[in-house]
Structure formats: C-alpha cells, structure tokens
Amino acid sequence: MSNRRKFIAQAVLGALGISVGRPAGAIQPWSNRGAKPPPTVLSTWNNLPANKKAWKVIKKGGRALDAVEQGVRLVEADPDDMSVGYGGRPDREGIVTLDACIMDEEGNCGSVCFLQEIKHPISVARLVMEKTPHVMLAGQGALQFALENGFKRQNLLTPQAAKDWEEWKKESHYQPVINIENHDTIGMLAIGQDGHISGACTTSGAAFKLHGRVGDSPIIGAGLYVDDEVGGAVATGLGEAVIKTAGSFLVVELMRQGLEPQAACEEAVRRITRKQKGFEEFQVGFLALNREGKVGAHCIHPGFVYALTREDTHEVATASSFM
Ligand code: ASP
C-alpha cells in the first residue's frame, strides 16, 4: 500500500475509533497501581482442598509462591487423583512420568519434565528455579538433581493406575479425552496479602501417552505464565493444543493489552478453535487472574470447573465454553 493510501486508510479507521499499527513500544505496561488486589487462590478443576491448603499460607501472610507450591503438593500426593503425581496414570509402557512448573512474581521460573519416581515434581521445579541457573530439567537429569537434593525415590504406579493400564492395553488405543471432570492437571494462581502473584502447574500428563511425551504443563508460557504487572494464566486439557498457541502467555499478553481476564481466555480458546483442526474432539480450558483480582475461565467443551478462594470463601464454579 502506498504511504498516502495507508495514511487515508488509517485516518478512516481512526475516525471510526479503531486503532491500527501501534508504533513500537506504544503498549504501556498495564498495572493496577494504587489499590491492592484481594488475596486470592484460583485453581483448575474441583480442587478445593488444594485451595484451602494454599489459603492457609496466604492467611498467615506467606508468599503466594509458597501457597501455590503447598496447594498443588496436596494433589500430587493424592493417590486418588489419577492425572497428577502419585497415582497418576502411566504412559503406554506402564511408566508414570511427571511434568511441573512454577513461576514467581519476579518472573523467576523453574520446571521439570519427564520426571520419574519422585512424588513432588513441583518442589523439584522450585529448586531448579532457586538453585540452578537453568529453567528446565528433563528426565534422568531431573531425577538425578532431585535425588542429590534429598528427594526420595518411590514407585508412583498405584494398583488402580496399573489396573487401568492393563485395561487400556487390551485395545491400546490412544484417544485424547474430551473432559475428565474433577481429576485433571492442577494449575494454580495465587495473590498474597502483599498483592503479588505466583503460579504452579503439575500433571502426569495425558494417560497412556507415548513414552517421552511432554505436554504443556511444564512449559512456561504454555501451561502457566505469570507477570506481576499484569496477572497470570494456567491451562488444562490437551497439552499439544495449548503448546501450539503458547496459551498461557497469550492470555497474559491479551490482558496486558487491556482485555479483561474473561475476554482474554475467550480469545485464547477462539485462537485454538479457529486454527486447530479437530477441536471438537479435545478439551482445553484456561483460567486467568489479573492484578485487580478479576477472574476469567473459558474452555472449548462444557464441563470445565475451577476452584476460587477469597476471604475464607471457597467455591467451585463452572467455566463458560465455546461449544
Ligand atoms: N495439559 C496436560 C497435558 O497435556 C493434561 C491435562 O491437563 O489433562 O499433559
């Protein structure tokens, strides 16, 4: 387009109140300077006990980072939760492999993926963040690091998960599950009394996945992203779909540009449904929390619920959906 035509087009759009082609650097860091956001704990699925655990930390004036770590550890240790930590369903070789990441208010982050035989990958991820110059450790290296730092090796395959695997082997048919109510990856965001935000995400990933498969949950920007100036986001559902759209980073960046958390989650889901074939067959859900304490929750298929804690009230709410 010639400069003149471009100028006219911009003038017309400008008159209509539509902004085009912001000059570089024009997006101002957005933050709620002034009023502090309300202390909050927000997590994927029906994880009220995890929220309550995190809330105890916040109530005592603890860091949001400690709150999210403590909160998700509860789910990692729960043998009845078959998508996270101990008791998680194994891959197609019958091996439980875990992914987790954590991010604090300063943008520090740590992650482990394809970790085996360690019950609390979130705490290993935190140590990666705090004790190494790296962000992410994988597989054998992550295990070695965990053992060197005092974590104990243990068998994570529970009898129930082994039974499910035996059952699955009869057909050996991998199909992404559209929705697994109440038992799924836990992604958690929290705002402490000091107004700062942190997040954590932990999972055993897709059940009966290929050995070596890593999903979105340990990937900063996909399963989790936090920017203290703006807010945070977490994702659950088919990790491959979330990675392809850098989902949590996208939600946070949309909020930075002025979208409310709900609108940001809706736009991220729309990005997936517009660009990725087969979305009718899989689920993705996003949660967002901004610096004002506003919450957003949206998913592709109905059925995604989340837990919200504030001022001692703990509630489970249902996210809106695209379908
Ligand atoms: N996002 C996780 C993964 O793909 C799984 C889930 O949330 O259910 O590994």
Image (spheres, rainbow, N blue to C red):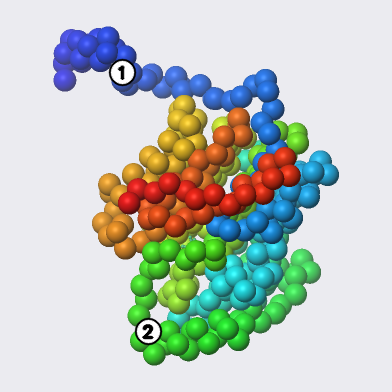
Q: Amino acid at mark 1?
A: Ile
Q: Amino acid at mark 2?
A: Ser
Which residue is label 2 attached to?
172
Residue appearing at x 27%, y 47% in the figure: 274
Residue 190 picture location, percent across and down: 66, 44
**For mark 2, does the 10 Å Cα neighbourhood hold few (<14), some (14 to 19), or many (20 or more) residues?**
few
Closest to the observer: 307 or 244?
A: 307
Whether residue 115 is visible here, answered yes or no, is no
Residue 106 picture location, percent across and down: 66, 38
Is 260 drawn above or below residue 124 in the view shown?
Answer: above
Whether residue 74 is visible here, answered yes or no, is yes
Q: Left of 298 or right of it: where is 3?
A: left
Which residue is label 1 attached to?
18
Closest to the observer: 280 or 89?
A: 280
Q: Left of 282 or right of it: where is 196?
A: right
Are the residues at dot 1 and dot 2 in contact (C-beta closer than 8 Å)? no
Residue appearing at x 68%, y 53% in the figure: 51
Is 20 drawn above or below residue 85 in the view shown?
Answer: above
Which callout, 1 or 2, points at the residue further toward the start of the chain? 1
Circle 2 sits in a helix, a strand or a loop, which is it? loop
Residue 248 picture location, percent across and down: 49, 46
Q: CA distance from mark 1 to mark 2?
A: 52 Å
Q: Left of 272 or right of it: where is 203?
A: right
Where residue 146 sits, quadrant-wise, is: bottom right
Circle 1 sits in a helix, a strand or a loop, which is it? loop
Residue 223 picture location, percent across and down: 51, 53
Looking at the image, how many numbered discs can be counted on the residues? 2
Q: Left of 291 or right of it: where is 180?
A: left
Res. 37 mark: none
